[in-house]
Image (cartoon, rainbow, N blue to C red):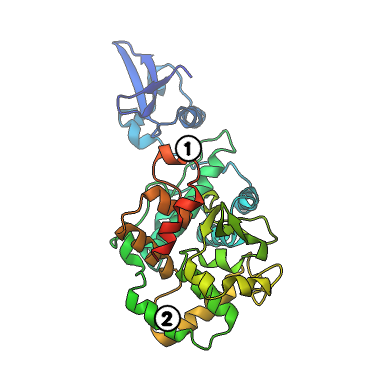
């Protein structure tokens, strides 16, 4: 459209000149958008609603104050049903994330969609955000899941889809290392005392976490064929090769050397007595074998005044850091991605034999 003009501030204007008996005059109206596509639509709507005739007496009286004359049209809905688009979005992610994550996405996005009739409106998103309760991490989770959904929508249409959650979030005031305490040596002593009398399978899940730093569900979903020798070293294989096994991320796929203390306590004997899923007492819930164990451990630790299970993982990370082990080694044991492109993109896995020293430090 030849009558569009871009200001030095990046805002599009509708500009139209006309002649009077004395001199040339001009109508200039802000279209209040930085999108050329949207500017063309708004200019067209203005022309239809305010027909322009090139005679002085028909110049609209409001052209002296053009900003007041233009009414911003509501953004068109490029999708018939956002809830049906949400179904497509979760199906597209089903192969890369677990069932629990799919449920989280549905919960967060549906909560927002049910709260407003104008889902693309910044004001609606802000009102939803202001009404959220809970910790900063909980509120940020809602923002993150909704923002990812709207970014995905933008890739599926020729229209300019606004992400109403862009730039929103709560700043965390607590350092990451302080949000969940690590087990101390005193906590570990009390944990070992509390385990006296527990059923073997519960005791082994706790002990493996204590001496490996593995995630709770990684341990709960182990099969007998996930315990093997790699380069002469007994290891746990963390993978998704067996039924109902999942990985949190691709970096989670790894071998973790088995601590000598676990071998001394008879882990291999326990495994020889079991076939298939090592902890068959656990049933699958929402794609996770760790759900029911987690519920039990929450009651167990509360009774004994102990930190949560995941704090065993923090104990492992803290121990590795205090010993000054290289970050790429600790990432390999814990299943984290490295922070640098060099290790992420070009680096290969660290030999298992070089990880034994780390695990033995626990």
Q: Picture quarter containing residue 286?
A: bottom right
Q: CA distance from mark 2 to mark 1?
A: 39 Å
Quick one: label 1, few (<14), some, or many (20+) residues within 10 Å? few
Say whether marks 2 and 1 touch (CB < 8 Å).
Answer: no
Residue at 50% x, 41% y is: 348
Residue 193 shown left or right of residue 200 in the figure: left
Residue 227 screen position, x and y as percent: 61, 62
Residue 111 screen position, x and y as percent: 52, 62
First-in-chain label (2 vs 1): 2
Decide: is 103 above or below 163.
below
Residue 349 screen position, x and y as percent: 50, 45
Please say whether residue 124 is visible from this viewpoint. Answer: no
Decide: is 288 above or below 266.
above
Residue at 43% x, 54% y is: 125
Name the residue nearer the viewer: 296 or 206: 206
Looking at the image, how many numbered discs can be counted on the residues? 2
Residue 92 screen position, x and y as percent: 63, 47
Residue pointed to by mark 1: 345
Farthest residue in the top direction? 22
Q: SS of the residue at dot 1?
A: helix
């Amino acid at each position: 459209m030849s009558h569009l003009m871009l200001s030095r501030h990046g805002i599009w204007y509708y500009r139209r000149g006309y002649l009077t008996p004395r001199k040339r005059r001009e109508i200039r109206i802000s279209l209040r958008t930085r999108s050329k596509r949207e500017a063309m639509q708004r200019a067209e709507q203005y022309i239809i609603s305010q027909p322009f005739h090139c005679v002085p007496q028909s110049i609209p009286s409001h052209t002296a104050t053009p900003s007041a004359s233009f009414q911003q049209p509501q953004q068109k809905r490029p999708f018939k049903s956002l809830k049906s688009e949400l179904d497509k979005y979760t199906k597209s992610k089903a192969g890369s994330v677990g069932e629990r994550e799919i449920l989280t996405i549905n919960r967060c996005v549906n909560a927002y969609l049910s709260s407003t009739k104008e889902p693309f409106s910044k004001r609606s998103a802000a009102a939803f955000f202001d009404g959220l309760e809970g910790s900063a991490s909980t509120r940020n989770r809602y923002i993150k899941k909704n923002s990812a959904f709207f970014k995905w929508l933008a890739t599926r249409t020729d229209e300019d889809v606004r992400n109403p959650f862009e730039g929103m979030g709560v700043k965390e005031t607590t350092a990451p290392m302080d949000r969940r305490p690590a087990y101390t040596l005193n906590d570990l002593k009390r944990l070992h005392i509390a385990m006296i009398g527990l059923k073997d399978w519960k005791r082994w899940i706790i002990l493996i976490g204590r001496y490996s730093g593995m995630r709770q569900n990684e341990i709960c979903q182990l099969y007998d064929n996930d315990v093997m020798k790699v380069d002469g070293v007994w290891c746990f294989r963390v993978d998704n090769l067996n039924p109902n096994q999942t990985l949190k991320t691709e970096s989670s796929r790894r071998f973790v050397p088995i601590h000598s203390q676990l071998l001394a306590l008879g882990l291999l004997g326990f495994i020889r007595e079991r076939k298939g899923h090592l902890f068959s007492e656990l049933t699958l819930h929402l794609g996770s074998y760790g759900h029911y164990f987690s519920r039990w451990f929450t009651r167990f630790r509360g009774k004994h005044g102990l930190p949560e299970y995941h704090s065993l993982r923090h104990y492992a990370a803290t121990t590795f850091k205090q010993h000054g082990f290289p970050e790429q080694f600790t990432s390999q044991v814990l299943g984290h991605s490295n922070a640098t492109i060099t290790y992420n993109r070009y680096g290969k896995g660290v030999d298992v034999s070089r990880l034994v020293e780390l695990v033995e430090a626990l």
